[in-house]
């Protein structure tokens, strides 16, 4: 079966398709590197997808040995059996460069460490406020020739800063060498939305405003900000996960079929969805902050930053006009899960349908990935009544699953930008949330372990309320319907 990527492998010039010959990781001593990037590098080595030097850069004056120790520790923290051979190979590829990102000397050291590498990939896993100066220093120190730049989210702080950052990047690099990461685009479960919709033909006739009543996406996290107080308080839930992860899920749910004939097909359709979403109205937003947030390390005691956001948007297109899309994301909620609920319209005859809840549910993780369809069937017995049931497809064999960071880093090293956010898409996404950034709406406090501020209920009143991800096991039990 052809891989979607084949479209990207043809018709491109050689320099762009040549794999990177070194990976430079800015932010090598940071939290993201420790939790996500080192494990991804380890799996890349295990799968023979990485055999070039990896240069870690951070401010701290450390040595190669310190970096190796941190990588070893990160892999051990993942648990499970460790492939010692792969780990040793990875450690062998590592070099460390320490220094201030503002000082030219740091980049001179990097240039030296790069040695004969002529196509480095620079991965900026650093605070967004440093992106511009690092990119400029890379260019000045001659480390940018033939290079790719991989940039972590959030890309900018709002529409204006994203535009500025795009302009600064384009002054030194063409778009084809810029890789804006949104790790949701590399997740199996999110990519599966695309396949479920477009690799089957049964869905297309009903996947529109005529049959779909509403769409809800919940990204619930039971944990809080896990020591990332400074980062989180500069960011907040809307910038942290709504502008990027949640809108990408909306795009995959709502886009038209990518033609598959050229590399930009998916990215073209993503941006069309974003452009059809009008900028959000603050009246369709509820912001919350969990009790206790202000006492977290790195958070000011008068912080007005949201740790919960619920919002409602519309897509003004032929397919979706009039269908509400609801998004809810927050920290310290009752469970950790990301789920999509697509509610179908009620069939016309009450005597057969009863309390109909025809809906698709996509569970995107963590852990179990599933798709289920809630339907009604005849309740066995004399009575002619229906009962609810659920058809579920659960992917519990995770052995072949590829972690999002592993997939995306591998793609960027090979120069395949299909699953990265393009310049126009990132700006279109910021344009949607720009009017709701900052203190445009009151901030409601909520109890940790609750579903956020009560006020959020009003956003979902006319679609039967917010979906309860905790209730998913209950749904699978067939209960007799009321006669
Ligand atoms: C990150 C956010 O981008 O995504 C975090 O900064 C969030 O706040 C995380 O917890 C969730 O990612 P995942 O893959 O665990 O769902």
Image (cartoon, rainbow, N blue to C red):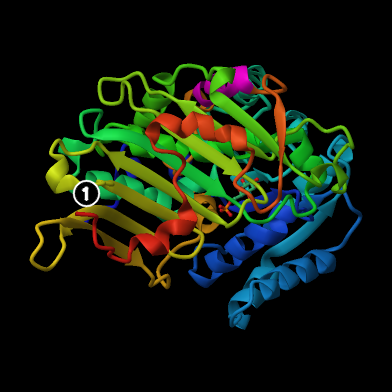
Image point (62%, 21%), residue name: 436
Which of the pair 65/118 is nearer the observer?
65
Query: Which quadrant, please, contains the C terminus?
Result: bottom left
Query: Which quadrant, please, contains the N terminus?
Result: bottom left
Instruction: Decide: is 464 above or below 480.
Output: above
**Residue furthest front as drawn:** 483
* Res. 145 visible in picture: no
Which of the pair 185/213 is nearer the observer?
213
Q: Which class describes the residues within 10 Å of circle 1: few (<14), some (14-19), or many (20+)?
A: few
Which of the pair 455/344 is nearer the observer?
455
On the picture, is 443 further left or further right than 45? right
On the picture, is 250 further left or further right than 413? left
Image point (44%, 54%), residue name: 364
Secondary structure mostly seen in magenta is helix
Which of the pair 185/221 is nearer the observer?
221
Q: Residue 313: horizontal and vertical position, in percent?
A: 46, 25
The tally of labels here is 1
Q: Label 1, secondary structure: give it.
A: loop
Q: Which residues are magenta?
A: 428-436
433 inside magenta stretch: yes
Specify the quadrant of the image occupied by residue 78. Answer: bottom right
Instruction: Identify residue for label 1.
Output: 199
């Amino acid at each position: 079966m052809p891989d979607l990527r084949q479209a990207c492998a043809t018709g491109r010039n050689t320099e762009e398709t040549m794999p990177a010959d070194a990976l430079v990781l800015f932010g090598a001593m940071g939290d993201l590197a420790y939790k996500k990037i080192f494990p991804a590098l380890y799996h890349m080595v295990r799968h023979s997808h990485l055999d070039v030097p990896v240069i870690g850069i951070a401010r701290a004056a450390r040595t190669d040995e310190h970096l190796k120790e941190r990588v070893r520790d990160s892999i051990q923290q993942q648990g499970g059996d460790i492939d010692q051979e792969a780990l040793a190979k990875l450690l062998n590829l590592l070099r460390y460069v320490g220094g201030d990102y503002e000082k030219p000397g740091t980049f001179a050291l990097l240039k030296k460490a790069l040695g004969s590498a002529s196509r480095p990939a620079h991965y900026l896993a650093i605070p967004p406020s440093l992106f511009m100066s690092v990119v400029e220093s890379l260019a000045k120190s001659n480390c940018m020739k033939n290079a790719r730049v991989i940039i972590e989210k959030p890309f900018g702080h709002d529409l204006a800063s994203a535009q500025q950052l795009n302009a600064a990047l384009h002054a030194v690099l063409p778009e084809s060498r810029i890789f804006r990461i949104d790790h949701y685009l590399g997740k199996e479960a999110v990519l599966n939305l695309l396949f479920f919709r477009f690799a089957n033909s049964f869905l297309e006739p009903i996947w529109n405003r005529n049959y779909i009543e509403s769409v809800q996406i919940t990204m619930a996290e039971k944990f809080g900000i896990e020591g990332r107080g400074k980062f989180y308080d500069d960011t907040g839930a809307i910038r942290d996960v709504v502008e990027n992860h949640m809108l990408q899920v909306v795009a995959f749910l709502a886009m038209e079929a990518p033609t598959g004939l050229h590399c930009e097909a998916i990215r073209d359709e993503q941006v069309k969805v974003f452009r059809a979403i009008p900028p959000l109205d603050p009246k369709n937003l509820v912001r919350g902050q969990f009790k206790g947030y202000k006492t977290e390390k790195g958070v000011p005691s008068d912080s007005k930053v949201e740790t919960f956001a619920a919002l409602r948007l519309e897509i003004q297109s032929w397919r979706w006009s009039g269908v509400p899309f609801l998004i809810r994301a927050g920290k310290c909620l009752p469970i950790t899960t990301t789920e999509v609920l697509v509610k179908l319209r009620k069939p016309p005859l009450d005597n057969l349908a009863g309390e109909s809840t025809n809906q698709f549910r996509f569970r995107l993780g963590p852990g179990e990935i599933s798709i289920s369809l809630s339907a009604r069937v005849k309740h066995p017995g004399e009575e002619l009544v229906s009962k609810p049931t659920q058809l579920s497809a659960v992917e519990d064999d995770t052995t072949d699953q590829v972690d999002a960071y592993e997939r995306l880093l591998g793609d960027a090293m090979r120069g395949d930008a299909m699953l990265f956010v393009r310049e126009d898409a990132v700006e279109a996404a910021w344009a949607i949330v720009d009017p709701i950034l900052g203190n445009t709406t009151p901030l409601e406090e909520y109890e940790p372990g609750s579903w956020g501020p009560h006020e959020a209920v009003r956003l979902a009143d006319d679609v039967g309320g917010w979906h309860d991800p905790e209730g998913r096991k209950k749904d699978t039990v067939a209960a007799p319907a009321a006669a």
